[in-house]
Image (cartoon, rainbow, N blue to C red):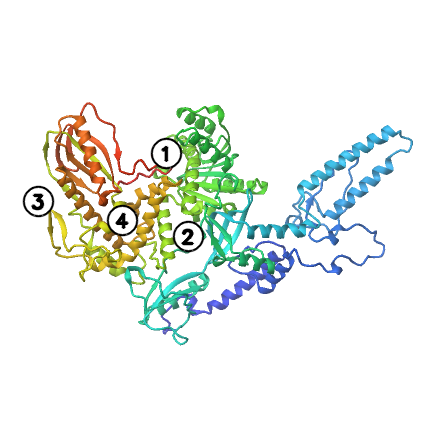
Amino acid sequence: DNNITNTDIREIIDWGYYIDRLAKSIQKIITIPAGLQHVANPVPLVPHPPWLQRKLRELNDSFKQQRITSMFKKRIVGEEPACQISEVVPDVDVPVELEDSSPKKKRAIAPSSKAMLDIEDMFGKSQKKRVSFSEEISEEKDQVEVEEEEENDEDTVDKWLEKRRKKWKSLRDRHKSMDGNRVTRGLSNFIAPQERIDQTMDKYWQVLEVRELNKPGLFKVFAMTDGNEMKTLYIKMRRSFYINSNIEQNETTKHWITLQQKSTKHYRLPHGHKAKYLYRVEIDEEYFRKNAKDLTNFVASPEIAGVYEMSVPLHTRMFTHLGCVAQLHSYAAVQRKKEKRNISEQDPLAIGDIKRLVCATNPYLEKGSASFKRIFIYQAGEGDRQIIAMFTIKETSTDLENVCETLNSDNEVINSINATPKRAECLVWITKTPGAPDTNFNVTTQLKRLIVDNGMRSADYDLTYSMTSLATSGECWDNLDAALGHYSVRRRGPTCVVLQTSLSKEAVFRSVGNLGEFPCVWIQAQKEDNILPTLQWQLALTRRCIEGYIRHSLWLNMRIKCSRYAHIPVSHVGEDFAITMTDTFYTRLLDFNKHVIWASPSNLPDLGGAEEDLAHATLCLGVDSEFTSVTVPGTYNSYCVEIDILHLAINTVLQARYVHDIECEDGSTFLDTLSVPLPAQTQQIGNDGELVHENPGGNLASSLQQTVQAFQILYRMVTNWKNDLNSVDGSFADHLMIHFYRWLCSPRSLLYDPALHQLIHQMMTKVFLQLLAELRNLNAKVVAANFQKIWLCTEKNDTQSAEAYCKHIIMTVNSKTLFQDIEFEIKQYWQGLVFLDEENYGGVQPLSVPSPVTLSPEEADVDTKDKEEFQVECSEAAGVQPLSV
């Protein structure tokens, strides 16, 4: 047909019809038989039919009253009566393997029609016969009767009692073995499952990981519910976004979607966009994806001014709302108990039925509240040169916390070595070159060598290992999958897996299917892990594997502490935890203040379709660096000092009401909401280094004015951090303040906004210029200055006078309100200095150099000890260098 322009097979044939036929075939052959055998749906994309779901709910309902006809059956003539417990009590014919261990008599068990068969029995590959519990009881009864018949009446009492004692001991051992390997039966089987359901609904959850499943909008949550018990919960998250319409939507203009207006009257849009008729829409994620094309056509119509929050990742919204400690709302729990509904993949919880709690009243992964084991998996290398290691650690999370508390109480610095687990089992798989001999490096020796090098006693550490050389990396992954499956079958209690790998999460889950049964915490691999020497690369990989094992305990302990402070599940803190935590704090504050967020994985914020306009404006405006640095080249014969400037951005935000001279187009200031009258001038540095005032040739008022509302919320977040400095979590607040400016100008942050960055940068320029003016008023001679450093010429001829002069200058500057939150750290003294620019300078250092100090009016109120310990932990566990702005 020449009229056909679209040759896609889905457009030519009735694609939906064939998809439906395929789904019904899959149901008939796979999913329905699996459901009737109490097996989870092996094909989640093809849901069970409604009648099967109803049937499964009836079968799994432990409170359903049994029919009298199910407790009795008609006796067949000629059949001997037997105590068929499995027919009286439901669900007691759980298959168990019966091995006759009686030393007196071994008797074969006749096949029974009640024997439960599995797929191995059908194909003749099972070596052991499986019998029901009723047959086991009958056999034991028959055995006792035979033993009683063999007793001789002529035996004396002593002999009779001796035989009886042996028989009783044998029966006790048999009952203990049966009770240890068999699930609870009888009346407790009716009550225990519901008690476990009630416990999950009544107790609060300590969330370890929120994992998105293949089904759109469905999440699998791993959480600790009560001490040493881990639960798997299923939560459904709906897609929500905002539609700003030019006309009021009614029944005739709703088109394909059901709009839900939910108190959006007082919501504020990003960049000051005017909300005309604002609607908040909530739909299922599956429906959203199927109708994405229709939605695109709908929002492209002239009557729609913009659509917001379309780019917010669903998993980000999920763990931001859920937090690290959560609980089911009481009304939702009562409703589910009343309807006897369990939390399953077919009947998940709604995110609106869950409330986020605080860690202050509900401890998160602390000693006494939860304890779990962990497995550390390390993978490095690429191609045919790879190593995969699995460390099964015998110590629990409580043991790790006890070690850290002991070191803190002894005033010892926590490092990777003294936090390393002392007992573990290690399985190593490494690829080998074809034709080369098997590799077998002693992992224990490598570990103890590193421990001794760091001054620790190697005798305290017990690491057993096994190394296997395999031909391909695929075989290594298969062995890891089998090892995890074996660990899962043994059921050693709640376990969290910590992985350090250079591969993506999707690739790892495809290779290791059993990994889906454990909560996972991911460590980003170092780039140098895949750079291997030509020779002895196996030894290099083994050493890096041991180093990763040593570092991971301190890394995990630090991430748990970050989770408690930011209320984020430990698996989602991320490698750059400062950016993740700041994004989470800011998102929650924006949502609390009814401000539509602009989160987006791209480098531009989500502005309802106006992103390209912002990108063009950003390219035109840029970041003006003309006034962010001052240099006065020359030769200075007196003492000079190099001073670091810390927290300039934080100080600018906190002291925004005192920042002068930012004017808008209408003559008002951008901080009118703070009730601060500002003059209509700007400041610049002249050619001779003097501060001059002049009217600006142009301004950024139109773009800066739009971010005032977002800036006010940002101010509250920074204020909260400052208030937390004196609390227990003061070290984390200080770390977030150090990385604040890096978060502000990093396109990797979800809430990156070039306009907000431009606004704060302009304010920092004003503070910087006024700082230089203040130094000039103090008759200080500035050699060079930028946002990070200042070089001053003291005009002093000895070290003591130069040090006293610098301290006087710093204390005087800090006494001003505009600069009270800036910290000045003296880094270096110069007896003489030749300065050209920031990259080209040199000088003579004095023989007696004072120790570097950091001066601030509030340094006596800040717990400097905690800050130093936190900086040591961060530099070693995270490897992130703090910025000075």
Quarter-of-image position of residue 162 = top right
Residue that numbered label 3 is attached to: 687
Type of amino acid under label 3: Asn
Type of amino acid under label 2: Thr
SS assignment at label 3: loop
- Residue in the picture at 69% in, 59% down: 65
> Can you give x and y, in whole percent of width and height, for residue 629 in the image?
16, 43
SS assignment at label 1: helix
> Do we see residue 645 in this rendering?
yes
Dot 1, how many residues are within 10 Å of its Cα: few (below 14), some (14-19), or many (20+)? some
Dot 2, how many residues are within 10 Å of its Cα: few (below 14), some (14-19), or many (20+)? many
Horizontal side of residue 73 vs 862, given as left or right:
right
Horizontal side of residue 327 vs 615, given as left or right:
right
SS assignment at label 4: helix
> Can you give x and y, in whole percent of width and height, for residue 563 in the image?
42, 44
Of tags 2 and 1, which is closer to the observer?
1
- In which quadrant of the rendered image does the N terminus lie? bottom left
Which circle's residue, 4 or 2, is located before the other in the chain? 2
Of tags 3 and 4, which is closer to the observer?
4
State the separation of the CA atoms marked 3 and 4: 29 Å
